[in-house]
Image: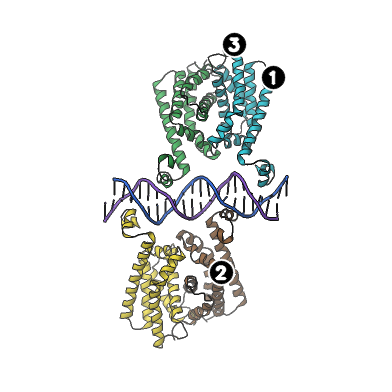
Chain colours: A yellow, B brown, C cyan, D green, E purple, F blue
Amino acid sequence: MARAAGVATGTVYLYFRSKDELLVSIFQRMMREAMADARTVLAEIDDPAEKLRRLARGHLERVGRDREFAIVCQVEFRHSTKFMEQFSSAELRDYLGVIRDTIAEGQARGVFRTAISPTLGAKVLFGALDEMATNWILSRRRYALTADADAVVDLFLNGVTA
Amino acid sequence: MARAAGVATGTVYLYFRSKDELLVSIFQRMMREAMADARTVLAEIDDPAEKLRRLARGHLERVGRDREFAIVCQVEFRHSTKFMEQFSSAELRDYLGVIRDTIAEGQARGVFRTAISPTLGAKVLFGALDEMATNWILSRRRYALTADADAVVDLFLNGVTA
Amino acid sequence: MARAAGVATGTVYLYFRSKDELLVSIFQRMMREAMADARTVLAEIDDPAEKLRRLARGHLERVGRDREFAIVCQVEFRHSTKFMEQFSSAELRDYLGVIRDTIAEGQARGVFRTAISPTLGAKVLFGALDEMATNWILSRRRYALTADADAVVDLFLNGVTA
Amino acid sequence: MARAAGVATGTVYLYFRSKDELLVSIFQRMMREAMADARTVLAEIDDPAEKLRRLARGHLERVGRDREFAIVCQVEFRHSTKFMEQFSSAELRDYLGVIRDTIAEGQARGVFRTAISPTLGAKVLFGALDEMATNWILSRRRYALTADADAVVDLFLNGVTA
DNA sequence: AATGAATGAGACTTCATTCAT
DNA sequence: GATGAATGAAGTCTCATTCAT
């Protein structure tokens, strides 16, 4: 981190109390950006399906922008249960909330099936996108991660059944 | 690990050459079990949709059986990119392969849409189930993880669209 | 050691209090044998020069008899200053004493130069033989160690000067 | 080592990758110094016998300079056969080579007996000096190690025979 | 404020020794 | 007595954090 920022190791500790605080800070900045993007989507788009598509694209665009950063998110953040518990409760909940609300909105408008729990739906979509991100990091091939967004959302919207 | 097994630290090294070998060993045992379960499902069931449902149930049942074990899988295994790269190539590929082949089989029979890439479909389903598992581990509530399987597969099969 | 003796590790501790005691015991047995050989030589031979030759041959024969054993002597015994201090004071002193006395005897008979300190002479001869042993252990070639004895003693007796 | 240098354990690892590398580094520095001293002797002195005397003095002076250092050389370096095999082949071979060549030179000039193998002669002289060093380390008395050099070389040159 | 060498707690591992069988 | 699996102290090494400059 210090090297990437072009400063000495000690300098980092002038701005962050500890490595954990640095990671939390990175995570929160990422989530703030994610939430800002999401709010823009919610404001600009009306159709719930299209909202999901745009949220998914935004998600993968964000992750795919910087591979190093993505590795931090997919690997470093998951080091300890303790750390995951801490952030999963607040910021991530809000992010999943946006997806959940969008699904609920679609149900209210009658375009989404009410048989689906919005909370569960949000987790499924998030889990699917997260898996795309993980695969992209671990893959030796350097394909455009964003390209997966539409396919994932198509599957999420319409299912695999013919 | 040693503490959990009620033995001294050194004892672990009588059975595993190193910590990595222990983790790999746990992972491989888990994957062997997963593949054995999966093969049973493939042999017993004919309908591709039902196969997916049974694979999903099996997956969450396995993870939900032992919380400690699940934590090792969801947290410890993701410590390092290097470690993940190592086994994501072999064992996990086979497991995803089972899902992929089932989707392809459904397409061949005309019950699944051919617009869906079986590989991507497999990742989506796996990612969704993995997210259920992670949420279950991090949740303070002690609900039955398996209960999510049907809802996830319903969503995967039919989508969210009304 | 236990493996070589065809017994279980624990069995060794029925006969020796500790690893150090075992090593000391081996060392003492070796020195007892060495002293016995040396006394035989002293009794059988009259000529001091011939005594030295026979002592040297005996030394290298003993070391060269069993390579594993020689490694223990040349490597294991020198692990710690503490250990070396312990045994160098007693048994080894007796062994060097035999060489020293033989040199002194030669001086008394007028066949060896009195300018040479018998104590130093004993160390020199021992050091030379010890170096032969060490070289033999480290060498990949499996030559007969004993063959060096005569050359070493010739050098010790007559020097390198023409 | 760290304690002797007055630093924390971890600090050593800023300068040496591992304990082995540290030992190798110490050994190589010692051999570099030894070879430099030896080359000076070879250049300054013409008489082979005098060369040997000066090489021996240099050897014992170097060892006798720092007791702690000498203990590392005589004890630590001989911990494992593997470690000894590694460097006995390269650096030590060069050092013995200098002695061997000096003996061969003496033979070529007719001042040393050709019956003596220069290689064996080198080992004998080295072994004798090494034994002096070991004795000095183990001795409780704090005599000047260098004083032995002349006596050892006199013995090496002229032998013990009257 | 910035630096980066130094720190030392803690992780992984070995191996001399013990002890239940 | 014999066994060998189990033990845990001690060794090597890492890396998050500190601190003198």
Cα separation, mark 3 vs mark 2, equals 89 Å
In screen coordinates, is C52 left or right of D47?
A: right
Q: Give me the disc on residue C43.
A: 1
| Residue A142 appears in the figure | no
Picture coordinates of residue B37 (x, y %)?
59, 71
Q: Position of residue B43 (x, y in %)?
A: 62, 74
Residue hosting label 3 = C110
**What chain letter is assigned to the residue under label 1?**
C
Sequence order check, earlier mark of 3 and 1? 1
Q: Check whether the beta carbons of the residues at disc 3 and disc 1 lie within 8 A of each other.
A: no
Quarter of the figure with the N terminus of chain C: top right
Instruction: Kindly indicate whether the residues beneath marks 3 and 1 are on one polypeptide chain.
Output: yes
Give the residue displayed 66% in from the left and 32% down from the top.
C29
Q: Nearer the viewer, residue D41 or C4?
A: C4
Q: Secondary structure at mark 3?
A: loop
Helix or strand or loop: what does disc 2 sit on? loop
Label 3 and label 1: CA atoms lie apart by: 20 Å
Asked if residue C144 can be seen in this view, the reply is yes
Tell which subunit mark 2 falls on.
B
Tell me the amino acid under the disc marked 3: Gly
State if disc 1 and disc 2 touch (CB < 8 Å).
no
Q: Quadrant of residue C148?
A: top right
Query: Is C60 drawn above or below residue B84 in the view shown?
Result: above
Q: Identify the mark at residue A98; answer none if there is no mark.
A: none
Looking at the rendered structure, the kind of residue marked 1 is Ala
Crowding around mark 3 (Cα neighbors within 10 Å: few <14, some 14 to 19, many 20+) is few
Residue type, numbered disc 2? Asp
Q: Residue at x 46, y 60 (%)?
A: B80
What residue did someone put label 2 on?
Answer: B66
Of residue C89 and residue A149, the one placed in the foreground of this image is C89
